[in-house]
Image (spheres, helix red, strand yellow):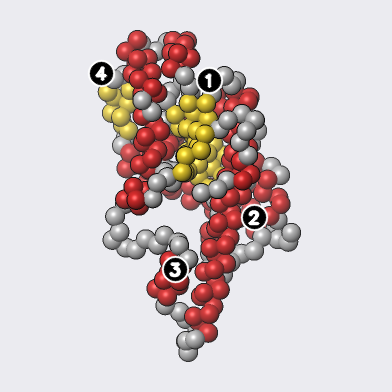
Amino acid sequence: MGSLKWYNMTDILFPPFLTIALTGTPGTGKTEVSKQLESEGYRILHITEFIRRYNIPSERDDERDCDVVDMDALEEAVFEYQQQIRREFNQKVFLENLKLEDLHKSPEFLPVLLVESHLAHYLCDLSVVLRTHPNTLKERLNERGYSDKKIMENILAESIDVVLCDCFDYCRRIYEINTTEMDIEKTAGCLKELIHALYDDEFNIYSALMEKMNVTAESIAVRTFSGCFPISDVLDTLEDDGAVVYEDGDDDVGDYMEEKNPILMKYVPGQNDWSELVD
């Protein structure tokens, strides 16, 4: 393959840069697994550390023994951080003349940011949910010194799929990994496999859409004396191909998520082939 193609209309967005949530009930292994990947060079954003570093407003809930974060402020700060990371990566692509096959050679070349937190799925539209059997979760939380009340609250949340149900309100794709019988190394291996496959899948979709957009734009521009084209014509053509187009004044994308059922995939060791993700 040659060097990455920089599309005329999307220089700042190409190659696509994914932000993926690593979420789940406390005790399912998010922090340990993300730190394992971080030690190997993957881009990880730990929300708990991020909140402290950027002084995101929060209030202490003594009754529930937890902090309640200002989600609007957090979302805005995370978005700005995402854009910073995206710009830095795009500059690396340009300066180092990266090729398509280079993206998977090293974590630093993979255009992915993994956001780790039980709040991460509120900030991303792709989520990986770590799950653990309640009995095992109880043992892990006991080892952490959680109070009996907090342990029971988290066990109940895991039993009735609280985090997973939240994901269906905020995410277009959800991937579930059961960590009950898996150690950190094996869980990290599954997660890496999934991340790389997800990027390939998103890259193919994005590339096809951008190609269509450029061809459409050029075709319309040829028919105008000014050499310009009405963006509405481009969007209409993309919608004909099944793309979802949001316009100013549209409601939150959550409305779309309710209409289009999000995709859920469960990881089964030895059976899943992440390289063939299908809608």
Quarter of the rendering containing residue 141: top left
| Residue kind at label 3, given as amino acid type | Asp
Give the alpha-carbon distance from disc 4 to disc 3, as whole Å: 52 Å
Dot 2 or dot 1, earlier in sequence: 2
| Circle 2 SS class | helix
Which residue type does callout 2 highlight? Val
Q: Earlier in the sequence, mark 4 or mark 3?
A: 4
Distance from the alpha carbon under mark 3 to that under mark 1: 45 Å
Instruction: Give the residue at x 38% y 50%.
Output: 260
Q: Residue 93 carries which label?
A: 2
Residue drawn 37% across and 14% down? 151
Q: List the residue tagged with mark 3.
A: 240
Closer to us: 167 or 224: 167
The residue that disc 1 covers is: 180
Q: Which of marks 2 and 4 is nearer the N terminus?
A: 4
Q: Image quadrant of residue 232?
A: bottom left
Callout 4 touching callout 3 (CB < 8 Å): no
Residue 192 seen from this side: no
Q: Nearer the viewer, mark 2 or mark 1?
A: 1
The three-letter amino acid code for the residue at tag 4 is Glu
Q: Are the residues tagged 4 and 1 within 8 Å (C-beta)?
A: no
Local crowd at mark 3 within 10 Å, few (<14), some, or many (≥20)? few
Give the residue at mark 4: 63
